[in-house]
Structure formats: structure tokens, C-alpha cells
Amino acid sequence: MKAEAAVVAAGLVASLAATAAAQLPAPPSGRDGETVAIRDVRVFDGRAAHEGWTVVFAHGRIVEAGVGVEVPDEAVVVDGAGRTLLPGLIDAHTHVFSDAHLREALAWGVTTELDQFTDEGFAGQMRAAQAAGDVTHRADLFSAGVLATAPGGHGTQFGLTIPTLTGPADAEAFVAARVDAGADWIKIVWEDGSTYGMALPTLDELTAAAVIDAAHDADRPALVHVATRDHARRAAAVGADGLVHAPHDGPPAPDLGETLAEAGLFVVPTLTVIRSIATGTEGDAQLSDARLGDALDPAAEASIRAAYPPRPSTEALFDHGVAVVAQLRDAGVAILAGTDAPNPGTAHGLSIHRELELLVEAGLTPAEALAAATAAPAEAVGLSDRGRIASGLRADLVLVDGDPTTTITDTRNLAAVWRNGGALDLIGVRARLAEARRRAGQALPVPGPLSDFDDGTTAVAFGAGWLVSTDRMAGGSSTATLEPVDGHLTIAGEVAGGGATSWAGGLFFVGDQPMAPADASAAAGVRFRVRGEAGTSLTVMVFSQGTGTMPSFQSRELTGEWQTVELPFASFAGATPESLMGVFLGAAGRPGPFTFDVDDVMFY
């Protein structure tokens, strides 16, 4: 919900049971002229389970599925005994900022992601590749593109410059621009922050209703981000098609489920991220299962271990969300599985397996939870070619050991994944994991320069580069921008609210991927030149595995003139340079605007 746009871009491996990998080291492809038959397998077809089926697919499509299906002579046969075949999983709430996110998703059996906010240019590139029909290495992406929000509202904090709406008159043009950019649906943010003990600007009801009407006029579903029961009711009243979070500001009123069911809304509860906000321990819950925890690269593990700061005001949110989901299920509301990855405590692909588990704990049957990640999201957004196992549909398929229709966590026993008939390269996935771990332990090319900004860009000598970082991921409202100017980097913005958890500035990721640890132990510390108004204070934070999810930090008073700052890693309490993840330069604690000029950043 309060995601940082660059929290995570990693996790290149599926969780594979050792016996399954031994039996099926290289799944056959059912694409380019090849035919595959999975014989004597339990099938969950998107709605119900069937025993003893044979499923035949070729040229990326399911040819036939059922009992007694004849196996073609040319088919490569896969033994399905003791296994269950599922439609490719669909995560109905993610935020995708790179191709790596989609590769990560596929490695966990998620063949389609429904993105609820990303850069429209990136989404267009992904759609174009999908339309060409030759993508097999990643999950498909469908997206809202840019969300509809108020100036300064939720969604404006991620470093992307986006249009906002000030009133109903803006709705038609906003929706038309999204449609022109290729949006598959329109997402509206109705978030005032009250659930989390803060205040955020948000759309008024007339504006939200106008956006919903404009979406429908453009033949696009209208999905609404809500956190409160009141906003859920109001969204239903003004014609929304779905809610992309379950309301969780309190226990449900007796008629909430009935109200949403009568309105025909679907709901994506996102229980995993709600639990992450409420408890701060969601990462531990996922990593405690070896099928998940033992199959992570370092960056994905850092994402899963990340946590929202605990607050007394959020402790009950997960219990409220669970109670709402139970009522929605009993009222017959369509429920879709979504993770809100890559928020703290989540990761693309991996966390859908946790979301399914939490949906079952909230009262869904295992079969209902599986439907929430297959047929239900496909139907909700009009993807008629996927989400089920039936003749003529895409061969997006996941084979698992065991029976997740009775034990939902058996979805984690991945044995094979096919996307549009193309088999996931299990050996290659494992090799990439090993390489990611090797790189994480490899020494960085330091001491040496990092960024001098002389070419007018934020180019770096190593690492994933510079990105905006603010307290909005923790519920704050501070802002920042990064702009190369005249051979240096200008970091500007405003710290709102003040206090220990208020910050804004630029964060340099030292590993190949955001928050991936890297070995900087050959360097003694970080050195840079900085200029800022006399009396202002620059905050430097160091993130490493040794400091956990919280950084170690120091401050330096500025004089108005250029000065050189040299900070040994040893001066940051708890920092471990052999597992360094990031270095932050900016402002923290003191409320108000700031501008810093930074140049010649290096590890010395």
C-alpha cells in the first residue's frame, strides 16, 4: 500500500521439491510445434478439482483436457501421479517497475500480474512484447498505468511525475489519457490515511464518481483503492467494479458484505501486506517455510525481511482484514488473490503462496483460494484466454507435488511451470540463483569513485544506482527529487511532520539490484562533496544486513559553501560493509524544505 517504488527487484528462483526436480529436471515444452501430455494428474481447472485427467497442449494452447483423453503419438508424456496441475497463477495486485519483477513472478508459478500502478511507458513496452507472442521468460503484465489521485495524495510519492485530479471536471481527460496510454482498467485512490493514524489528501466523492463514470464510458473497469469501511461503501454506491484492498480500519458492520455483494464488486484483500503493516513479522512467517526461505536470492530476502515500523494504531488491522474477508466470502463477494508486492514483507511471485494461505485462514476453502488466483481474476478484468484449464485456452500451467485443493501450502511444491506452453528453465533458474548469491558475496570495485555527475546523469560506477527515498513508504508525506545540474546532483524536497521516522532524499543501491547486499569491505568509508544553506543539516544513512531493516545514520551541519565529508563505515553503529545495501543522502527529522548539492561521491 505505502510502497517504495524501488523496494525490491529480485528473486529469480522457484521453490522446487528435491524429488520433483529429480523426476522432472527439464520439463518438455508445448510450444513451437511440440506436444506435451500430462497423464493421470489431479487437475484444478480454475473452479473445481478432478481426478485422473490427461491434459494435452501444443503450440501454446490446451488441446484437450479430461478423463480418457487420448495421448497423441508425438507427445512427450509427463507422469502426473501424486501431483496437481493448476492454471498459471494470477496475482491481482502488484506494482511492477522492471522486467526482473516479472521474471521473479514466473519463477514462482505466477504467469500473469495485474499491476495497479507503474510507469506507463514501461507498461506499454511489456504489452507490445506480449502482443508479439514471443515472450516466455516472464509473466504477462496488464496494468492500470497511472492511478487517479489528488495532488499530494497516495501514489504521488514514488519518484514518478504523474497527473492528479482536483475536481470532477478533470475526470474525462484523465481517463482518456490513460486509455490512450493503453490502460487495461482505471485505478482510483480513495485513501485519507486515517486507517494508519495520519492525514492524506484524497479525492472527494464527486471526483471519484466522475472518474468511475468516465472509465465505464471508455469501456474500462474502475478499481478503487480503499482502506476504510466507509470508503468501501461509498465506492460501491458510485458504481466501482472492484476494491483492490479489503477495508481494515475496523471490524465489519453486519451488512458490509451484503452491501458489496449486492453492488457486484470483487475485492482483492491483500492480507499479506496488511499483516506486514500490522505485525512487522510477515517476513519471518514466509521465511520459516523452507520451500520459500531456502529458495531466495539476497535481494528477495531483503525485501521479505523488510518491515513497516510498528505502531500501536496498526496492531489490529490484520484481524480486521481477516474478519472482513470472512464476511465477504459468506456474502458471496468474488475474492481475488493479490499481494501488493513489492511492499515490505512481500516479493513478486513468492508472496502469492502466502496470500493463498492467509485467505484459507480467513475462511475460504482451499479450492476457493485457488480460484481467487486463477479463474476469478481472469474473469474480473476480462482475460478470457487464461485462468482455467480447458480446450483452446493458453497453456499457462503449474504442476505441483501434492494436493493444494486440500492442503493449500502444497502450491509451494513447484515441479514445473509453463507459460504459453513454454517450459520454465528450472536448471537456468537455479543457475541464476547461484550467480546472484555469488555476486552478493563478491567484493565491489572499491576504493574508487562512484558518481561525479559530470555527464549530466546519475550514472554510477557500480550498483543499481540512485533513486528517490522518502518516509511515504512508512506512512509519511515527505517529498524529494534528484536532478543532475551543472556537474553535480541536486537533492531537494521537504520533510513533513518531523520526528525520527521522517526523511527525504536520495538512496544509492550498491548491489546489482535494489537492497541487494554487496561486499564493500575493501573500502574504509564513503566520501563526497556537499553544499547546502548554512545551518541546514545533512543526514547520511547506511543500510546493511548488520543493521537489519533500520539504517544507521549520522548528521553533518552545512555552511553554505562546498565542503568534503568523509565518513568511515566503522562510525555507523552496527553497519557491516561486507553486506552493504545502500547509502542515503538527504534530510531527516527536522521539518521543512531542503536543497543539497552533492558531487564526487566515492568509497575511499
Image (tube, rainbow, N blue to C red):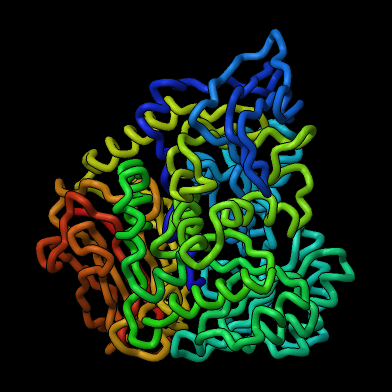
Residue 365 horizontal side relative to residue 392, left or right: left
User: Is residue 245 shown above or below 152?
Assistant: above
The spot of residue 477 in percent (x, y) is 47, 83
Task: Report which quarter residue 92 is drawn in.
Answer: bottom right
Left/right placement of residue 18 relative to residue 418 reads: left
Q: 551 or 520: which is nearer to us?
A: 551
Q: Residue at left 44%, top 43%?
A: 412
The quadrant in which residue 571 appears is bottom left
**Residue 36 visible from this viewpoint:** yes
Q: Residue furthest top?
A: 73
Across the whole image, how many numbered discs are drawn on residues?
0
Which residue shows up at 46% across the image and 37% down it? 402
Q: In this orientation, which residue lies closer to the viewer: 75 or 65? A: 65
**Residue placed furthest toward the right:** 217
Q: Position of residue 154 (x, y in %)?
A: 56, 78
Quarter of the image where one finds residue 541 = bottom left
Residue 323, position as x, y percentages in the image:
51, 77
As drawn, the residue found furthest toward the left would be: 570
Q: Is residue 328 above or below residue 303?
A: below
Residue 583 horizontal/vertical position (percent): 29, 62
Q: Looking at the image, can residue 87 be seen?
A: no
